Image (cartoon, rainbow, N blue to C red):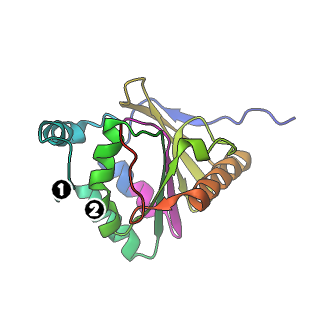
Amino acid sequence: MSSVPRMDEVSRRLSFDEWVSLFGSATRSLAHLEMRDGYLVDYEDERYKEWVAGGRTGVLPREDHPWWNLTADTVARGVSIRRARIISEPVSEYIAFEHAGTWQNVEFGEQVRWLPRGRASAIALPGNDFWLIDASRVLFLLFDGTGRPIGRQLSADDDVVALCSTAFEQVWRLGTDHAEHRLRSC
């Protein structure tokens, strides 16, 4: 029986410069698995409040944020970026907000798929959202109970990488491409 792998844990979230470094370290692929029904990310707070106040309908307008340039530059270097989201149905208000803005992820080069949680029951999933970098390292993202980012864990352990890689590929295979996905709302 193997022991639990030690992971380097940092108790703060990544700065934008650290995201640039992480994305810059990828040479082939980045895969991101999201499994929460709500996130509270500081830079989204006002945009989310405006969307709620506007009646929670329609596609979000274009957003100027350095994330989009980072995404486009990474894809332009030949790095594939895939994002898979496991969601509860009917969807939470936050997931509807996220769905309304995902067109921009796609426009800047990400491939995005959605998987209803009921279809993920037979998939062995890690305990936290993650980024898989070149199928050789995993960056786990840690959140508090309200969905605010509180930390991260980085691992290059072969067993951890294999778990995350397998989980991501199974979610990807079962998921629906963003262009075809329709939300089931309350």
Residue 104's tag is 2
Residue 24, image x, y percentages: 42, 63
- Magenta stretch? 21-38
Between discs 2 and 1, the one toward the N terminus: 1
Query: In the rendered structure, does residue 4 fall within the stretch colored magenta?
Result: no
**Is 29 inside the magenta-drawn segment?**
yes
Q: Amino acid at mark 2?
A: Gln
Snapshot quadrant of residue 107: bottom left
Q: Are marks 2 and 1 in contact (CB under 8 Å)?
A: yes
Q: Residue 135, relative to residue 147: is it above or below?
A: below
State the image coordinates of residue 174 (x, y, percent, origin top left). 59, 57
Tag 1 residue: 63
* Residue found at x 59% / y 35%: 127
Position of 53 compared to 92: left or right? Answer: left
User: How dense is the environment of label 1, judged by Cα within 10 Å: few (below 14), some, or many (20 and up)?
Assistant: few
Image quadrant in which the N terminus is located: top right
